[in-house]
């Protein structure tokens, strides 16, 4: 997959092929949902399983993003 690196405001920014970027976006969203579910699990313990599932899925997608970008 094609990607690259560019400089922006003195920082190195890595960008991905649009398909890899979509995987990364889904990974970030799943991890964010996992954290939100974890925070909600203090009031509703049933949300804890959802938190684990979303966080795990996000990590898996993040690994797939790394593999697809190489």
Image (tube, helix red, strand yellow):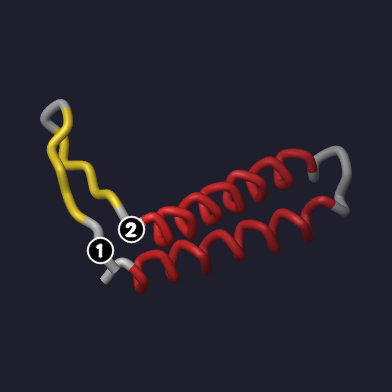
> Residue sitting at 61 percent across and 53 percent down?
30
Task: Tell me the crowding category of disc 1: few under 14, some 14 to 19, or many 20 or more residues within 10 angstroms, Cα based.
Answer: few
Q: Is residue 53 left or right of residue 20?
A: right
Q: Is residue 16 left or right of residue 38?
A: left
Camera-side residue: 1 or 52? 1
Q: Is residue 46 above or below residue 2?
A: above
In the rendered image, residue 43, in percent from the top left (x then y), is placed at 86, 38
Q: Secondary structure at mark 1?
A: loop
> Residue sitting at 48 percent across and 59 percent down?
23
For the C terminus, which image quadrant?
bottom left
Q: Which quadrant holds residue 10?
A: top left
Name, please, the residue furthest toward the top. 9
The residue singled out by tag 2 in the image is: 17
- Gap between marks 2 and 1, in whole Å? 5 Å
Q: Which quadrant holds residue 69?
A: bottom left
Q: Secondary structure at mark 2?
A: loop
In the rendered image, residue 26, in percent from the top left (x then y), is placed at 55, 54
In the rendered image, residue 63, in percent from the top left (x then y), is placed at 43, 68
The residue singled out by tag 1 in the image is: 2
For the N terminus, which image quadrant?
bottom left
Q: Earlier in the sequence, mark 2 or mark 1?
A: 1
**Does the CB distance between marks 2 and 1 fall below 8 Å?**
yes
């Amino acid at each position: 997959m094609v990607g690259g690196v560019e400089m922006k405001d003195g920082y190195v920014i890595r960008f991905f092929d649009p398909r890899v970027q979509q995987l990364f976006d889904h990974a970030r969203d799943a991890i964010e949902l996992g954290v939100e579910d974890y925070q909600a699990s203090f009031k509703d313990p049933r949300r804890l399983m959802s938190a684990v599932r979303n966080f795990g899925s996000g990590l898996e997608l993040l690994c797939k993003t790394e593999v697809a970008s190489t």
